[in-house]
Image: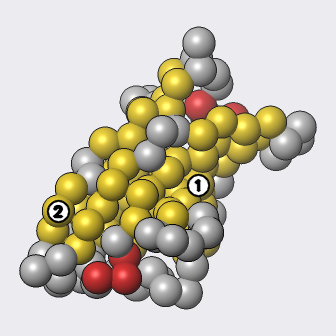
Amino acid sequence: QVQLVESGGGLVQPGGSLRLSCAASGFTFSSYAMYWYRQPPGKERELVARISTAGGITHYAGSVKGRFTISRDNAKNTVYLQMNSLKSEDTAVYYCNALYALTGNGYWGQGTQVIVSS
């Protein structure tokens, strides 16, 4: 059974940090590129960051570049999103996504809520 389980969300003050984790099971994690998306309240889902299968290539949305870092541990089947210098506009539900490039097959997690507020 395929599962992507996000954790690490919560309430944080502006300027603070959080680290999100996404634990994968039920598929060959190391063969999938991994993505973090977010959906702010009342808005559409947007791409935050992506990382290649081996972790050597990363890409970030302009709004988070320099503040967020995506990483992965293929031995632990886990992808991370380190979020620093958080702003109120980072408030959203954060989702991880796995994508197998050759077929377009992919999976989604259930999401974890991040609220940045004083």
Residue indicated by mark 2? 11
Indicate the position of residue 84 as horizontal and vertical percent values: 26, 75
Residue pictured at 52% horizontal, 38% vertical = 109
Residue lying furthest right in this view? 103
Indicate the position of residue 103 as horizontal and vertical percent values: 89, 37
Residue pictured at 18% horizontal, 77% vertical = 117
Q: Name the amino acid, label 2.
A: Leu
Q: How crowded is mark 2: few (under 14 residues within 10 Å), some or many (20 or more)?
A: some
In depth, the one of 109 and 74 nearer the eye is: 109
Indicate the position of residue 80 as horizontal and vertical percent values: 39, 51
Q: Is residue 104 visible?
A: yes
The quarter of the picture where the C terminus appears is bottom left
Residue 28 lies, with reference to residue 35, above or below; the image says above
Q: Kindly identify which numbered label has been placed on residue 67.
A: none
Residue lying furthest top in this view? 1
Q: Kindly identify which numbered label has been placed on residue 35.
A: 1
Of the numbered discs 1 and 2, the one sitting upstream in the chain is 2
Q: From the viewer's perspective, is 32 left or right of 68?
A: right
Q: Is residue 58 visible?
A: no
Q: From the viewer's perspective, is 117 left or right of 79?
A: left
Q: Name the amino acid, label 1.
A: Tyr
In depth, the one of 43 and 46 nearer the eye is: 43
Q: From the viewer's perspective, is 97 left or right of 90?
A: right
The quarter of the picture where the N terminus appears is top right
Q: How crowded is mark 1: few (under 14 residues within 10 Å), some or many (20 or more)?
A: many
Which coloring applies here?
A: secondary structure
